[in-house]
Each structure stands twice: as C-alpha cells, then as structure tokens.
Amino acid sequence: MYFVLAVCLVSDSLHIFGGKTRLFSKKFCLKNIFGNHLPKEDHKAETKEFTILSNGIQMPMIGLGVMHMHGNECVRAICEAVDAGYRMIDTAAIYGNEAAVGKGIRDSGIDREKLFITTKLWVQDADERHAKAAYEQSLRNLGLEYVDLFLIHQPLGDIYGAWRAMEKLYEEAKVRAIGVSNLNSGRLVDLSMHNRITPHVNQVEIHPFYSQEKAVQEMKNLGVQPEGWAPFAEGHNNIFRDKVLTDIGQKYGKTPAQVILRWNIERGVAVVPNPRSLPVSEKIMMCGISG
Ligand SMILES: NC(=O)c1ccc[n+]([C@@H]2O[C@H](COP(=O)([O-])OP(=O)(O)OC[C@H]3O[C@@H](n4cnc5c(N)ncnc54)[C@H](OP(=O)(O)O)[C@@H]3O)[C@@H](O)[C@H]2O)c1
C-alpha cells in the first residue's frame, strides 16, 4: 500500500480527489467550506458514491462506525453524521448501542429508507437456532423493521448454521443483504461454496498498515464487497502524522484521514471510520473527502 500511496505523490494521472470519482454533490462541497452556515436545503446534501452489491442493492462506500459510542454521544454523532451527508451507519449487537443508534436515526429526521444500516450477529447467537431471534432482538433494540445489512460478526461458533438462518431471513425479505465479518479467504470460499447465497459483504480490518491487497482481490473475484473496519488503524502508529500520508495530503490539500478514505474508495473498498474525537467540521471534511 505504501508503494501505491507513494506513486500518488508523483503522479497527477491518478484521480484521487476529483473528476469522475466525486463523493459528494457540489452543495456538499460548499458545506465543506462553509461548515454549518448554509441555507437549509444544503443540509439535504448526501453521499453520492455507492457500490452495487451482488444482489443489486446500493450500499454507500462510506459509513459511520459507532463501536465506541453510547447513549447521547451516539445519538448526537448520528445526527451530525446524517446532517453531514453520511448515509450508512455500522453497529453491532455486541457494541451495546443499538437503541442509541435507533434514537439517533429517529432524531436525525431523515427518512429511514435513505439510510443503510448494518448490524451484526454476535458469537453467542451464531448458530441456526438462535440467529433469527438475535436478528429480531436487534430490530427491537434499533426500533427498525429491517436492517440493510446483517453480518456474522466473527468466524466463531456454528457459522454455517447461522448462515442458513440468515439466508432464510434474506429470502423472506426481512433483511436487504447478508454478509460476514473477519473471514479469511479460505473460510469465505468455503462458506460460499457450501451454501446457496454467497455473502454480499465481508467486513475485515483494512488500513494503511494492513492493506490486505490479496484478500480484497479474492473477495472481488467471488463477488463479495470488501468493507474495511478501523480504516485509521484505531489511531495507532501515529497514523495521522505518518510521513507518506501527510506528504500526499499536502500535495492535494487533504488531511491524512481523507487520503486514507479516498485510497480505499478508489480501490473499491467501502469504509466505516469512527472519527469520534474530531470536531464536526473535520468529520464533515472527511465525509466529503473529494470536495
Ligand atoms: N467487524 C469488526 O470486527 C469490527 C472491528 C472493529 C471495528 N469495526 C467497525 O469499524 C469502525 C471503526 O473502527 P475503529 O473505531 O476501531 O477504528 P478507526 O476508525 O480506525 O479509528 C478510530 C479511532 O481513531 C481516532 N481518530 C480518528 N480520526 C482521527 C484523527 N483525524 N486524528 C486523530 N485521531 C483520530 C479516534 O480516536 P478517539 O477515540 O480519540 O476519537 C478513534 O478512536 C467501528 O466503529 C466499527 O463500526 C468492526
């Protein structure tokens, strides 16, 4: 990955931040510049960059990860994110914040159908007998009638049984897409080969120190959308002061965080960053990374 990023430094032919790959509408770019002081209609600006999953549904390429957020912090973060243009939220049963996510969605005032909500099945429920009830519990927690994407959180327990239950939920149109998380290539191929439905998404750790080029390519070969968790490497290794990222950012007038997100999106990897401690203005800038 470092090589790829370094090439960006010397090549203007890579459309990292412009042209065809714009992530947000023009209005949203204005919002990047003017912060929250825009006429009301500009707050309707929203993400314009999507991927199409193998079942034909649209999934935004960038979403808000809410793993460490609870209560009012989570509610506020979702309202801010929706206002900033985020349309995807990534939660999980084990995060213990599905109720706050649901409140955030309602408080944001946006139509439910405009959002793409992901939640995940935790290990204790990863079998054929418990997966459906766990899904229904997540829906009750969230106060939603469906989620857009339901993932098996970890490759532990009876994931084959859990997958059969999830296939049934999908075939009954109770969830729009189903997938997995943290499956290596071998397990992903095996699960796909021995079941009717190939996972629509595999959410795995991906960041500049762990680019997972081969795994990403193998997912694409299988028709599975790669999605990267912890795109900022959880803030480790002084990532936001990293020299390669900083140099690229300087060249394009972007922050290292923006460089990381754009690098992933350009190579077809959806991302769910958690910019928790950033001021709203920078969160918005990160969301509108091509602005
Ligand atoms: N499927 C899975 O197994 C799995 C596992 C882990 C995560 N996830 C998903 O991925 C999402 C994101 O992962 P993550 O939160 O672990 O990691 P991350 O998005 O890589 O990094 C978030 C951390 O980096 C810090 N940070 C972010 N932007 C920064 C900036 N510009 N300058 C300085 N520090 C910054 C934040 O620090 P502060 O804490 O100080 O704000 C935050 O803790 C989660 O919310 C979750 O939805 C999924």
Image (tube, rainbow, N blue to C red):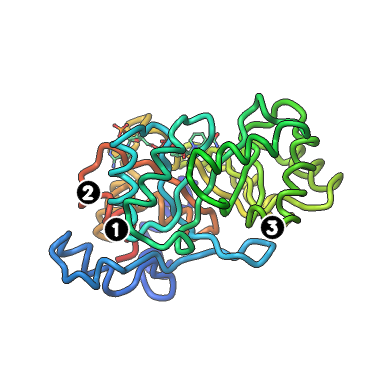
Q: Residue furthest right?
A: 194
Q: Give the numbered dot on residue 84.
A: 1
Instruction: Kindly identify the residue that appears in the image at 34 percent across and 36 percent down.
Output: 239
**Under 8 Å from ligand 1: the CB of mark 1?**
no
Mark nearer the viewer, 3 or 1: 3
Q: Residues within 10 Å of mark 1 (few under 14, many from 20)?
A: many
For mark 1, give the secondary structure. Answer: helix
For marks 3 and 1 on the same chain, the one whose residue lies earlier in the sequence: 1
Is residue 248 at least partly visible in the picture? no
| Rendered position, 103 above or below 21 | above
Q: Seen in the image, is 241 located left or right of residue 6?
A: left
Contact? badges 3 and 2 (CB < 8 Å): no
Q: Nearer the viewer, residue 163 or 72?
A: 72
Q: Seen in the image, is 255 located left or right of residue 106?
A: left
Q: Which residue is mark 2?
A: 280
Q: Amino acid at mark 1?
A: Ala
How far apart marks 1 and 2 lie (CA) works out to: 9 Å
Q: Which residue is mark 3?
A: 173
Question: Which percent across, then down, holds residue 235?
Answer: 35, 33
Picture quarter containing residue 121? Answer: top right
Instruction: Kindly identify the residue that appears in the image at 77 percent across and 49 percent down.
Output: 168
Quadrant of picture, ligand 1: top left
**Under 8 Å from ligand 1: the CB of mark 2?**
no
